Image (spheres, rainbow, N blue to C red):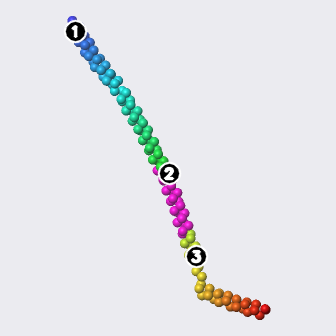
Amino acid sequence: MAQAADTAERLAYAEVQAEVAQARVQEQSERLPTLEAALSDAQLRAADERAQAAGAQQALQAEASRQRGLGQQIQQLQQRAERLRAEQRAVVAPDSLRLADLQRQQETLTDALDTTRAQRE
């Protein structure tokens, strides 16, 4: 009889445990839609964040490319400026004495030409 009482006690305890477990299952089942909605919202936010991060990365890459292009343009302009400075240094300023001498010679020759033409007429 003690064994039957022990078995009955165990059965009663198991029934209580089953009821507790059933209550937990019911509670979890009621919370499941809320948890699923929260999961869905979190997944949507994560996807949005990934899209924003991808957009930001593309913008950074475009800016880096633009900066590289500008750097190349600056380098080319600096090289051109250096070439122009070198050319400018290579150009010799006219000799003012030589220029004055040539102008006098031109005037003398022009006067001689005018005289010759006047004599022919």
> Which x, y percent locates residue 76?
54, 63
> Which x, y percent locates residue 89?
56, 75
Q: Which amino acid does label 1 sit on?
A: Ala
Q: In which quarter of the image is the C terminus?
A: bottom right
**Which structural element holds mark 2?**
helix
Which residue position holds label 3? 90
Q: Tell me which segment is drawn in magenta.
A: 60-82
Which residue position holds label 1? 5
Q: How far apart are marks 1 and 3 (CA)?
A: 120 Å
* Foreground disc of the pair 1, 3: 3
Q: Is residue 2 above or below residue 40?
A: above
The answer to which quarter of the image holds residue 51 is top left
Q: Distance between the residues labelled 1 and 2?
A: 81 Å
Q: Distance between the residues labelled 2 and 3?
A: 42 Å
39 and 8: which one is in front? 39
Which residue position holds label 2? 62
**Which structural element holds mark 1?**
helix
Question: In the orientation shown, which residue stands out farthest toward the left?
Answer: 2
